[in-house]
Amino acid sequence: MAKTLPLQAPRPARPSTPGANQSLKVVIAFALVYVFWGSTYLAIGMTSAERIPPFVMCALRFAIAGPLMLVACALFGRRVRISRVPKPCV
């Protein structure tokens, strides 16, 4: 009579070095901050901040960043929930 083996779920693949993946994420995050922060000063210099009020520059910056962040969330499969009822602070 043949022996039956118990069913086992396959083990998920693990990265060989988990620290390397984390280090890469940190490097990418710093690079993005460097580029975006630097582009802010470039935009201020190009638009001649003397003619544009600071409030308008701030509003424009958020008007551009908001949709870009929503597109990034959609690309990475993140859900964005908007509610009219604020969550209580705990």
Image (cartoon, helix red, strand yellow):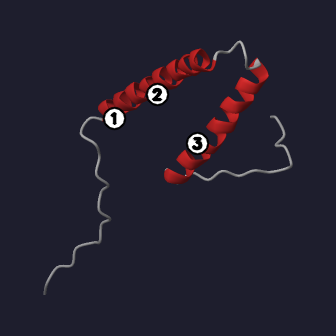
Pick whichever of labels 3 and 1 is earlier in the sequence. 1
The residue wearing badge 1 is 21
Q: 10 Å neighbourhood of mark 3: few (<14), some, or many (≥20)?
A: few
Relative to the observer, which residue lies in front, 57 or 69? Answer: 57
Which residue: 75% across, 18% down? Answer: 54
Relative to the observer, which residue lies in front, 51 or 27? Answer: 51
Q: Residue furthest left?
A: 1
Q: 10 Å neighbourhood of mark 1: few (<14), some, or many (≥20)?
A: few
Pick whichever of labels 1 and 2 is earlier in the sequence. 1
Q: Position of residue 13 (x, y in %)?
A: 28, 52
Q: Amino acid at mark 3?
A: Leu
Q: Quadrant of residue 64?
A: top right
**CA–CA distance between discs 1 and 2?**
17 Å
Pick whichever of labels 3 and 2 is earlier in the sequence. 2
Q: Position of residue 83 (x, y in %)?
A: 80, 51
Mark 2 and mark 1 in contact (Cβ < 8 Å)? Answer: no
Q: Nearer the viewer, mark 3 or mark 1?
A: 3
Residue 49 vertical placement versus 12 (above, below) = above
The residue wearing badge 2 is 32
Quadrant for the N terminus in the image: bottom left
Q: Position of residue 20 (x, y in %)?
A: 30, 31
Q: Number of callouts in the render?
A: 3
